[in-house]
Amino acid sequence: MSRKGHRKPLPPIDNVTDRFGWQSLLDAHVEALKVKGFSEATFSQRAKYIRWFALWCRERDLLHPGDVTKPIIERYQRHLYHYRDAKEKPMSFPSQHKHLSHVRAWYAWLSKHNHILFNPACDIELPKIGHRLPKAILSANETEKVLERPDLNDPTGLRDRAILEVFYSCGIRRRELAELKLYSVDADRRTLMIRQGKGKKDRMIPIGKRALDWIERYLSKSRPLLLSDPNEQTLFLTNIGQPLEPDSLTEYVRRYVEAAEIGKKGSCHLFRHTMATLMLENGADIRYIQAMLGHAKLSTTEIYTQVSIKKLQQIHSLTHPADLPPPKETDAETDASNSSGDRPNETKLESPTEPPNEPINPSAP
């Protein structure tokens, strides 16, 4: 996994000296997010989606954010719906939702800080994104095939095997793995410390013995060959001794999944889904899975209870009448059936009574 080259900075949207222009107000908004302690991923995404919207507006001679009205944003929403990429693939509803939610958040900030007279996006209805399950989940055997793909004779191959083992054992996010330090791993206690994960939250999670063994092999045999700065504390390094980029992790993990030829696609998050699902199927409590994954809400983790089909299949096979053997008759039911079947036309007579026409003597004793 080699480090990608640094991307060139994007050209400004418009004249940065125009303090009411797109670029000036976007820069002010990003600065405000930084001051409030938002993560780099948050303000980077905000800048990306606002830039997309700003360029679309400038193509239509809307030169300032204040020129935008509610009908313009509704038109932009229709544009996202009809958008097609180079392969004629439409934009998914989650992507449309993300584009519009960033635009709405930005205009709320502009209005709050009196950069514009009114908020044209306050009444925009975001598209429904539905309830989606993970696209693919690996079985234990399929996971092992992926783990076998790195070349262990190469320093980067040994590093990649350790990375895949950590993903599989802990289910951490790609950025969390890229930011792991040497002191994040406690081999004696078999724990992994995640610093400033999503939502800027720290958490300590367990890590399996096998993953620790591969980390130890990487530290003793591979990392010294990759290290260029003796003071570098990042755990996983590129072939030039630099910290790994999250995008590089995505690209190369995807290649290993494809090379395994298991008929499924995915990357770093695939191991996160796989770990949670397999642990649930093996009896782990969902609240422990929530703690490992770092989910703020249990409802986010509950998606894996729907993916984990093993228990549901067991209940289905044990209770569905179509899969159950026909019920056996008891001995009492068999005897009753036989006794009633010997004399099918026989009727049972009641005991005789006094003739109805015989006179009754009231003086009789």
Image: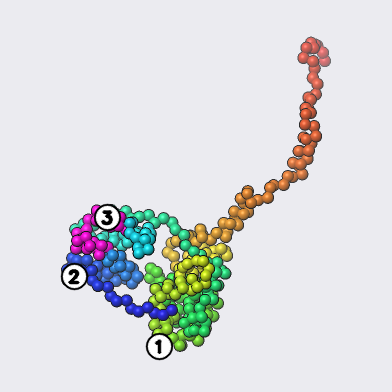
Q: Tell me the quarter of the picture where residue 231 sits.
A: bottom left
Magenta stretch: helix, strand or loop mostly: helix
Q: Amino acid at mark 1?
A: Ser
Q: Nearer the viewer, residue 311 or 239?
A: 239
Query: In the rendering, at what x and y percent does residue 257 appear?
Result: 49, 71
Q: Earlier in the sequence, mark 2 or mark 1?
A: 2
Q: Mark 2 to mark 1: distance in Å?
A: 41 Å
Label tally? 3
* Residue in the image at 24% along x and 56% along y: 72
Task: Give the label on residue 228, or none.
Answer: 1
To which residue does mark 2 refer?
A: 15
To which residue does mark 3 refer?
A: 75
Q: Tell me the quarter of the picture where residue 343 sits.
A: top right
Q: Is residue 152 above or below residue 104?
A: below
Q: What segment carries the magenta color?
A: 53-80
Where does the N terminus fall, quadrant-wise?
bottom left
Q: Earlier in the sequence, mark 2 or mark 3?
A: 2
